[in-house]
Image: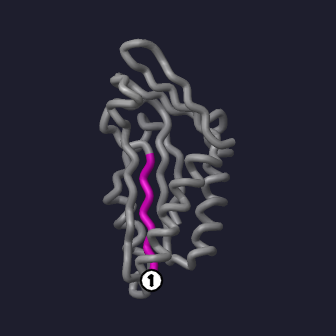
């Protein structure tokens, strides 16, 4: 497993890096599916043009540990072979990647269900603050935590 929360100025990990990571698992021969997700910054939100997005968490280490617990739980629940997750924090612009996930599993159904659960639980259970900056002001969105 690979689980990281990274300041976007420190390291660049791509979705291809995550695919390579799960492909290098020594049990890849048991896999029939790899599903990926790349969440990016949307340019329009409720009719407003997004100029910039700031994403933060009050404690990166704590949030990363909580993300690891989610991933371990999902891996066990769906019996998938490997999971790699990177969530960025920092300042972003339209089209920038924020959240990357790759899941390798034996069959497509449990693999995509595992991917979907990681996405949803990360969004609703982890303590992130999102500030959307538009031409008319700022909108703060709190999640999880």
Residue identified by numbered label 1: 106
The picture quadrant where one finds residue 30 is bottom left
Query: Is residue 19 placed above or below 87 in the rendered structure?
Result: below
**Which residues make up the magenta segment?**
99-105
Q: Residues within 10 Å of mark 1 (few under 14, many from 20)?
A: some
Going 42% across and 34% down the picture, which residue do you hit? 9
Q: Residue at x 64, y 40 (%)?
A: 127
The x, y position of residue 59, in whole percent, is 66, 37
Res 143 quadrant in image: top right
Residue 21: percent from left, percent from top: 40, 66
Which percent across, then down, holds residue 93? 34, 30
Q: Nearer the viewer, residue 68 or 38?
A: 38
User: In the rendered structure, does residue 84 fall within the stretch colored magenta?
Assistant: no
Above/below status of 26 relative to 21: below
| Residue 28, quarter of picture | bottom left
Q: Secondary structure at mark 1?
A: loop
Residue that protrudes farthest toward the front in the picture: 47
Residue 109, position in %: x, y? 45, 76
Query: In the figure, is residue 46 to the left or right of 145?
Result: left
Q: Nearer the viewer, residue 70 or 13?
A: 70
The dominant secondary structure in magenta is strand
How is the protein colored in the picture? one colour
Q: Residue at x 62, y 74 (%)?
A: 77
């Amino acid at each position: 497993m690979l689980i990281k929360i990274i300041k976007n100025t420190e390291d660049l990990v791509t979705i291809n890096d995550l695919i390579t990571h799960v492909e290098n698992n020594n049990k890849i021969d048991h896999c029939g599916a790899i599903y990926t997700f790349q969440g990016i910054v949307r340019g329009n939100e409720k009719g407003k043009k997004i100029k910039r997005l700031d994403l933060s968490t009050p404690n990166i280490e704590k949030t990363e540990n909580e993300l690891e617990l989610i991933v371990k739980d999902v891996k066990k629940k769906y019996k998938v072979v490997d999971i790699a997750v990177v969530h960025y924090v920092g300042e972003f612009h339209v089209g920038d990647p924020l959240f990357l996930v790759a899941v390798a599993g034996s069959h497509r159904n449990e693999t995509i269900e595992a991917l979907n659960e990681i996405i949803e639980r990360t969004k609703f259970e982890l303590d992130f603050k999102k500030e959307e900056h538009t031409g008319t002001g700022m909108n703060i969105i709190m999640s999880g935590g």
